[in-house]
C-alpha cells in the first residue's frame, strides 16, 4: 500500500468530488486527505475513511502527501492557492483563465522552483488536452489553420449570467458549435469565422411567476460579452423541466488543424480531435489525476518548477512501464 | 544560418521526398545532405543545391549533421540501419512493424546509449500520433475501450499483394473503416468487433488482356492474412483509370477511447481523434521532421538512448519557446 502515490484534494466542489471518484479507478494511487475551508466535521464525502482537515492544517501534513490537487476556481482561488501551496507540495491545478496563464505560470514557477516541487498548472481539457492537440497540429502541419469549437455543452459562466437577470429563478446555457462552420473547416476551406459564425447559445430559463418574459429574453440576448455577439435562443421552461432535463454538466468540443503539404501546398491534410463528455467536471478530474501521476514522476526525476501539459513526457501519465506501453499501445 | 538544425536524409523514396519538402516549411531547419544507395550522380532531387552522397560516406559527415532521418522501409532497411547509424548520429525512423518494436527498440537503445546519441523510433502516425492518442485515452479514461480504425486509404502492402496475383498488371487497395461499427463505438456501446466488422477492402485491378477475371477475383478474395478475413470487393478497371483515379496515396483513420466515470460508471465519456490525409507519405514526413527537432533538443538536454513519441515532452516538437506556446496555444 505504501508505494501508492498519496494524493490530497483541496476544495470539495464538483471537481474535488470528481477527483475523489477518479482516484478509485487508478489503483496505483491513494486518496489520503481532503482539505476544506468549510467546517471539516460538516463535510460529507463519498469516502468517509479518508480524513477531512481544515485547510489551515494542510502544511502540517506536507510530508504525508505526494501530490496536492487544487480543486478551486480560477477567478479568486487558484491565483492565491497555487503559488502558496507550491511552496510545500507538488501540485496540480486547472487554472483556465487563458489570458492570465503567463502571470499565473510565473508566480507558481517562482514558488515551486524555490521549494524544489513540481507544479503542473492549467490541466484539464481546455486548457489541457485541447492545448496539446493545438500544439501537435501546429508542429505537424506548420502551414495550416487552427480551429477550436466548444460544445455542445453547459457553460457555467453563461448559466450564471442568465440567473443574474431580474425575474429569472433558474437557467442553463448550452454553447453549441455551428455544424456548417465545422463542415467548411473539414472541407479544407480554411474559412475566417466570426464569433457568431462559430457558436450559437441556447438558453433554458425559468421565469418567476408574473415576470415579463419578453424583457428577460431581450436582456439576455443583448448582454454584452456573454450573448450579444452570438445568435442566442431563449426557451422558457418550468422549474421541473429544468431539473429533469438540464441538471447534467455535459460538454465537449473539437480541435481541428487544417494544413497543406507538397511542393506547392497542393495536398490537403486534416487533423481532428473531439471530446463528447457526459460530465465535464468528472472528465476534467480524470485529467487532473493522471497529471498528478506525471507530476509525482517528474519531481522524482528532478524536474521541478512550474510545468504545463506541454512539458510532460506522455509516458509519465501512465502507471505502466515504458516497455509495457511500447508493447501494447505504440 | 548556422544556428539552424542540420538535417540529412537517408533514402530518397516517397518518405525521403516528403521530408525534403517538409523541411522547407520549417525555417529553423536546414537540409544539408542526402545519402543514397543508388548512384549519387543519378539521383535527381527537388533541391539540387543540397549534395547527394553515397550511403558509404555517411559516417564521414557525422560532424556536419545534427539529425539523420532514416527514410527506408521497416522490413529490411531499418532493422539494420537504425542500430548502425545511431552509433554516429541522432536519428529518427518510422519503424512500423508493431510486433517487432520491442526488439528494434532494444537494438537501437544499445547503440544510442553507448554513443550518447538520441534515437526516436517508430515516428509517424501509426505508430506515432495514433499511439500517443491511445496512451492519452488510456490514462485519462482508465475504465474504457480502445478502438483504432484505418482508412479510407491506400494500403501499400495490400496493393503489392494484389499485383503479385497472376494476370494482374496493376492494382490499388483501399482499406475502408465500417461506418456502422464506428457509430456503435460513438454511441458508447463498447462493441466487441471482429476483423470483418471493422474494415472492408476495396480493390481496383487492371487485368492482363485475356486473363481470367473470375479466377483473379477469387484468388484475391481468398488470400490468407491479406483479404480472406475481410469483406473484399474487386473492381476491374483500365490502366488509364487506375492512373487517373488511383495514383494518389491518401490515408487516415480514427482512434477512439470510449470510457466511463462516476461513482457507478454511469457517465459516458468519449474521445475521438482522426486524420484525413491527402498524402500519407507527405504527412508522415512532416511528423518525422518535427520529431527530428525534438530529438535534437532532447540530445542537447542530455536525454540519450532510444526514445519513442511516449517519451517526448511535446514542447520539444515546436520551434517556439515555452513562453510563446503558453501564451497562444495553451
Image: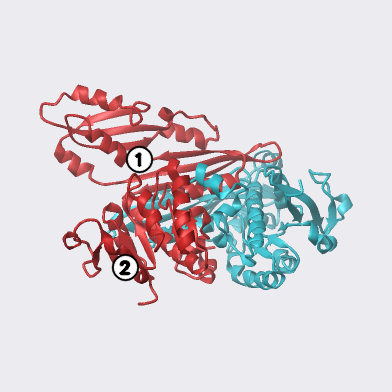
Chain colours: A red, B cyan
| Alpha carbons under labels 1 and 2: distance apart | 43 Å
Instruction: Find numbered disc 2 in the image and state the secondary structure of the residue it sits on.
Output: helix
Residue B222 picture location, percent across and down: 57, 60
The residue shown at (43%, 59%) is A291
Give residue B177's position: percent from left, percent from top.
50, 50
For disc 1, the neighbor class at 10 Å (few under 14, some 14 to 19, many from 20) is many
Which residue is outermost to the right? B41
Residues B137 and B292: in front is B292
Q: How far from the left and from the top, in percent, is residue A203?
A: 27, 33
> Which chain contains the residue that carries disc 1?
A
State the quadrant of the N terminus of chain B. top right
Q: Is residue A129 visible?
A: no
Q: In the rendering, at what x and y percent does residue A21 appear?
A: 29, 61
Q: Is residue A179 positioned above or below A72 on the image?
A: above
The answer to which of marks 1 and 2 sits earlier in the sequence is: 2
Q: Residues within 10 Å of mark 2 (few under 14, many from 20)?
A: few
Point out the residue furthest to the front here. A114
> Looking at the picture, do discs 1 and 2 lie on one chain?
yes
For residue A289, which numbered disc appears in the image? none
Residue at left 44%, top 31%?
A180
Check contact, mark 1 vs mark 2: CB within 8 A: no
Give residue B65's quadrant in the image: bottom right
B222 up-or-down from A254: above or below: below
Q: Is residue A198 visible?
A: yes
Res A181 → quadrant: top left
| Above-or-below relation of A309 to B116 | above
Q: Looking at the image, which residue is at 50% across and 42% down?
A: A256
The residue that mark 2 highlights is: A60
The residue indicated by pointer 1 is A152
Left or right: A119 as drawn, with respect to A235: right
Chain holding disc 2? A
| A125 displayed left or right of B7 | left
Amino acid at each position: 500500500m505504501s508505494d501508492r502515490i498519496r494524493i490530497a484534494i483541496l476544495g470539495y466542489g464538483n471537481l474535488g468530488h470528481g477527483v475523489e471518484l477518479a482516484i478509485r479507478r487508478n489503483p496505483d494511487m491513494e486518496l489520503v486527505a481532503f482539505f476544506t475551508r468549510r467546517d471539516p466535521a460538516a463535510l460529507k464525502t463519498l469516502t468517509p475513511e479518508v480524513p477531512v482537515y481544515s485547510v489551515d492544517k494542510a502544511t502540517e501534513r506536507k510530508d504525508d502527501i505526494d501530490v496536492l490537487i487544487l480543486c478551486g476556481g480560477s477567478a479568486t482561488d487558484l491565483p492565491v492557492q497555487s503559488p502558496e501551496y507550491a511552496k510545500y507540495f507538488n501540485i496540480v491545478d486547472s487554472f483556465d483563465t487563458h489570458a492570465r496563464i503567463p502571470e499565473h505560470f510565473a508566480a507558481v514557477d517562482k514558488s515551486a522552483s524555490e521549494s524544489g516541487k513540481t507544479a503542473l498548472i492549467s490541466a484539464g481539457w481546455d486548457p489541457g488536452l485541447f492545448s496539446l492537440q493545438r500544439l501537435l497540429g501546429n508542429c505537424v502541419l506548420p502551414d495550416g489553420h487552427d480551429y477550436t469549437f466548444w460544445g455542445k455543452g453547459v457553460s457555467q459562466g453563461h448559466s450564471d449570467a442568465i440567473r443574474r437577470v431580474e425575474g429569472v429563478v433558474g437557467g442553463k446555457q448550452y454553447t453549441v458549435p455551428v455544424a456548417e462552420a465545422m463542415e467548411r473547416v473539414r472541407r479544407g476551406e480554411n474559412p475566417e469565422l466570426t464569433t457568431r459564425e462559430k457558436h450559437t447559445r441556447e438558453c433554458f430559463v425559468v421565469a418567476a411567476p408574473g415576470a415579463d418574459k419578453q424583457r428577460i429574453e431581450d436582456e439576455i440576448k443583448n448582454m454584452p460579452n456573454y450573448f450579444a455577439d452570438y445568435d442566442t435562443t431563449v426557451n422558457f421552461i418550468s422549474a421541473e423541466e429544468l431539473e429533469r432535463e438540464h441538471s447534467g454538466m455535459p460538454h465537449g468540443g473539437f480541435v481541428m488543424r487544417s494544413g497543406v503539404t507538397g511542393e506547392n501546398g497542393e495536398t490537403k491534410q486534416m487533423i481532428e480531435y473531439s471530446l463528447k463528455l457526459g460530465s465535464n467536471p468528472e472528465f476534467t478530474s480524470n485529467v487532473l489525476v493522471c497529471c498528478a501521476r506525471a507530476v509525482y514522476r517528474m519531481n522524482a526525476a528532478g524536474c521541478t518548477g512550474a510545468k504545463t501539459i506541454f512539458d510532460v513526457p506522455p509516458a509519465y501519465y501512465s502507471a505502466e512501464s515504458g516497455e509495457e506501453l511500447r508493447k501494447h499501445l505504440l
